[in-house]
Amino acid sequence: MRWKVVVGNLGSILKVFGLAFFIPVIPALVYSEPFNAVVFLFMAFFTISLGYPAEKFGRPEDFHHNEAIVLVSFTWIVLALISAIPFVLTGLFPNIIDAFFESMSGITTTGATLLTEELISSDMARHGVDYSALGHTSTLLWRAVLQWLGGMGIIVLSVAILSKLSSGGMRLLQAEAPGPTVTRLKPKIKETAKTLWYIYCLFTLILAILLLGVGLHPYDAVYHSFTTLPTGGFSPYAESIGEAAVFSAAAQWIFIIFMIIAGVNFSLHYQGFFRHDFKKIFSNSEFKTYLALMFGAAGIIALIGASQGISVRDSLFQAASLMTTTGYTTETFAEWSPQVLRLILLMLMFVGGSAGSTGGGMKVMRILIVFKMIKRKFKQVINPRRVEVVRMGDAVIDEGTLENIAMFFSAYIILFAIGSFVLVWDTGDMMTGISASATSLGNVGPALGEVASDFLEVGQGGRLFSALLMWIGRLEIFTAVVLFNPSLYKKRRLRNLLSFDIKR
């Protein structure tokens, strides 16, 4: 392990990340929050000033696979800690544990929150109201900025900007990017990272313009554009998108469309926008399964919940929000009856979005491949001599990938069970603990029980543990968990000797 390479590249990332602190300065000045403006300016210069000596002391150059894992894992923790500081300095949260929970929830695009209704009061409609009455306008926007940066990935952005990475850039993306594989859109990985961010920014801009077109205040339009595309779900309103004084039916339909877009593999967006290959999009097995699951679940909810006054729009909104792990709400779905409606939404939390999207969860591709593996096993039981392969479209999935997916499912269930045990112990309520574990590990946000709207009923220890689950879930489990393996930090030659590899 060459720690100077890890530190040097972390310094380069800090320099890039420090620029994000300038964004909340704008609303701080517009809405007369001079102290907050000073805080964010200080944080910008502080983070950048940390990056320069780290880069100079280290060696910001290409790295080996184990160094990429350590860099990605440490980066998310370091950035979450730095991002928590403004929450404490501006007084939004009283202690660093709550601030760290909120920043980790933001940067991993989970969307779970500790904000009370007094801080994001539902009776303070933004239209015509002085934002400075809240005193935290710029700080609340910082939550949205965190989600927007975390959605496509801090590392993806860094690869797009940093010029010193070549082969190491692909290792970074493989360690951070969601899904079983990383699709190379361009010959150079740096160009792939840039293309992904171009598409991401384009969708964010289009959404903001559409929201302005249906009457949203510019602050609300920018804020919710920043939290929709990353499937984050933070909102400055206690009622989320259900705030009737702010969000019309037209606005809610726009959110539905863009949540669905955000849950699609961004390589398919590239095929549509840049290559106009729409046939490839609609013939994609994962895409068709993704839409079938979402619209199927929404249809069942609408049929069963019709007698309870649940509309088609609310059914589709919550199905899209929970499956893409965005976490917006228009209804208090934790109180929906019968309970089978809540069970459907809980199952959608586990499914998540497509591989290569900004959504969390297990990913549609993995679930689809697992079902294909089960189908293959049934055929082999009937005819043991039969040779059967697993395909996704025309591509044959190799046995190594199948093994990795099976291991991922096993690890996911084990971590979910451990998380449920810890959080049930912490909260004293089974439904609260189980759903808190599911929503943290899947980076979903809202849950059931006492954590349907916030995590205030979870103790300090439970909040730290939930933040740990968010981090593990965002890094697709193995990248985070392997960090605790001592062999990861051993020198290459020593690892070769331990594995009886005599080749040099």
Image: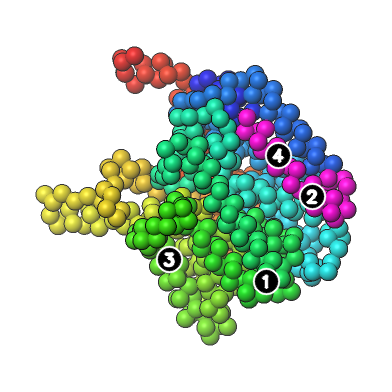
- Give the amino acid type for the residue marked by disc 4 in the picture: Leu
Question: Left or right: 313 with respect to 363?
Answer: right
Residue 79 in the image: state x and y as whole percent. Answer: 65, 38
Distance, label 3 to label 4, CA atoms, is 37 Å
Provide the residue span drawn in magenta: 12-37
Marks 3 and 2: which is nearer the front?
A: 2
What residue is pinned by disc 4?
Answer: 19
Q: Tell me which label, 3 or 1, sits earlier in the chain.
A: 1
- Give the amino acid type for the residue marked by disc 1 in the picture: Val
What residue is pinned by disc 1?
Answer: 214
Please report contact status of discs 3 and 4: CB closer than 8 Å, yes or no: no
Please report contact status of discs 1 and 2: CB closer than 8 Å, yes or no: no
Quarter location, residue 278: bottom left
Q: Tell me which label, 1 or 2, sits earlier in the chain.
A: 2
Distance, label 4 to label 1, CA atoms, is 31 Å
Q: Which mark is residue 26?
A: 2
